[in-house]
Image (cartoon, helix red, strand yellow):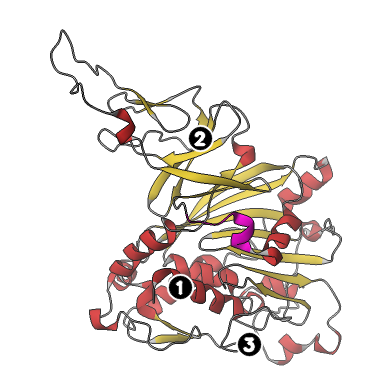
Amino acid sequence: MDVRHDEAAARPAAAADLRWPEDSIARVPYWVYQDEANYRRELERLFEGPTWHFVCLEADIPDKGDYRTNTVGAMPVIVVRAADGAINCFENRCAHRGALIAFDEGGNVGHQFKCVYHAWSYDLAGNLRGIAFERGINGQGGLPKDFCRESFNPRKLRTTNLGGLVFATLSPDTPPIEDYLGPEILGRARRVLNRPIRVMGRFVQPLPNNWKLYVENVKDTYHASLLHLFFTTFRISRLTQGGGVLVSPDGGHHASYTIGMPEGANESAYRDQGIRSEDRDYRLADPSMLDAVDEFGDRIQLQMLSVFPACILQQVHNCLAVRQIVPKGPGRMELHWTYFGYADDPPEMNRRRLRQQNLVGPAGFVSMEDGCIGGFVQRGIGAAGGEVSVVEMGGRTAESQPTRATEASVRGFWQAYRRYMGY
């Protein structure tokens, strides 16, 4: 553990500085990545507020009693398939003493969950159904006769299904996910989620930075071909190729995309500027990793889509995945990756996806740099809680643009963030 980093991450700005420095989404105060009180406010307003959160794939829980455990903000949850086919989600907390009801990542529970601590049991909707020795022994002990089980059920979340991705929300005020995303972002999600999917693999990546730095990184179309040598050298995503960024009207969601097309007179732009991310001497011993097919018929070879506040849907060539951002404190987070393909993938496409999964991930040829860059920022701002970052590429507002040399979708995140947080 980097003790210096932990100390910097935990050091708040002065209380008087916990305000937005100016009414601009192009300026972001660094205390927003550091302050403990602000982090607690985020858990309440963003993760327990009127927002949708990815909790599992429908393919994870096909049968009655199948379940997955996950986290919404700081709240552990259980997602389970009920006997009638419905998908239920409820807090993974026993009403008795607060222990986890389920502590495995997933499995099949039959018809009920039973807490290991004192054997209190819950049905597949999260209702408290059984209490061990509820009436005591031989007329002694047990619970009072007026104890009402219904008053002590774990909190329940609403669920919705978007093309096989299951989302949950605690708030009754969260709009239908179609309205939440808006037509353009919804269309881009359905572009990828266009038929039944299946899980190919998953893992968890701990990162030494505030969760919002990773959100920004995903939305930051400007950095991709500057930080990632692999993107630029092998022409997966270059600012000189076609593409752009779509930002939802509320700013919170985005979809950026790169179109595989000739760069024309701009082909030498990276080399002319001496940018490190193009290396003509960089070669692959096995170039089959880049054997991609245009399975969507639109020449888009990369699409990154975010659902506010903490979900990402990726397509890098034929590598498909969902990334879930899980905050773990002001200066720590986890990134939960789930790779998927389609249920009807032929063997060759399955092999292609498996090869291309080496592109994106903690040690991925494309994205291994993303695992450290957030930590570099968290350390760099350790004594700068009263300072601001500059987010002006492409202007000072948040709207869709036909270029990726912009930070429009980053500004969109802060537009939505300030609204939800009341700043």
Amino acid type at circle 2 is Gly
Q: Residue furthest left?
A: 140
Residue situated in front as seen by the camera: 6 or 385: 385
Would you call the spot at circle 3 few (<14 residues within 10 Å), some (14-19), or many (20 or more)? some
Residue situated in front as seen by the camera: 132 or 341: 132
Secondary structure of residue under mark 1: helix
Residue 194, magenta (yes or no):
no
The magenta stretch is 173-181
Pointer 1: what residue?
419
Quadrant location of residue 3? Answer: bottom left
Secondary structure of residue under mark 3: loop
Residue 174, magenta (yes or no):
yes
Specify which label sits upstream in the sequence, 2 or 1: 2
Instruction: Give the percent coordinates (x, y) of residue 302.
Output: 73, 66
Residue situated in front as seen by the camera: 306 or 239: 306
Residue situated in front as seen by the camera: 389 or 142: 142
Dividing the image into 4 quarters, which one contains the C terminus? bottom left
Amino acid type at circle 3 is Gly
Pointer 3: what residue?
394
Pointer 2: what residue?
106
Residue found 46% across the figure and 68% down from its top: 212
Instruction: Give the percent coordinates (x, y) of residue 364.
Output: 62, 60
Q: CA distance from mark 2 to mark 1?
A: 35 Å
Q: Residue furthest top?
A: 138
Query: Which one is closest to the eye, mark 3 or mark 1?
Result: 1
Instruction: Give the percent coordinates (x, y) of residue 238.
Output: 73, 77
Quadrant location of residue 385? Answer: bottom left
Specify which label sits upstream in the sequence, 3 or 1: 3
Confirm or deny contact between disc 3 and disc 2 (CB under 8 A). no
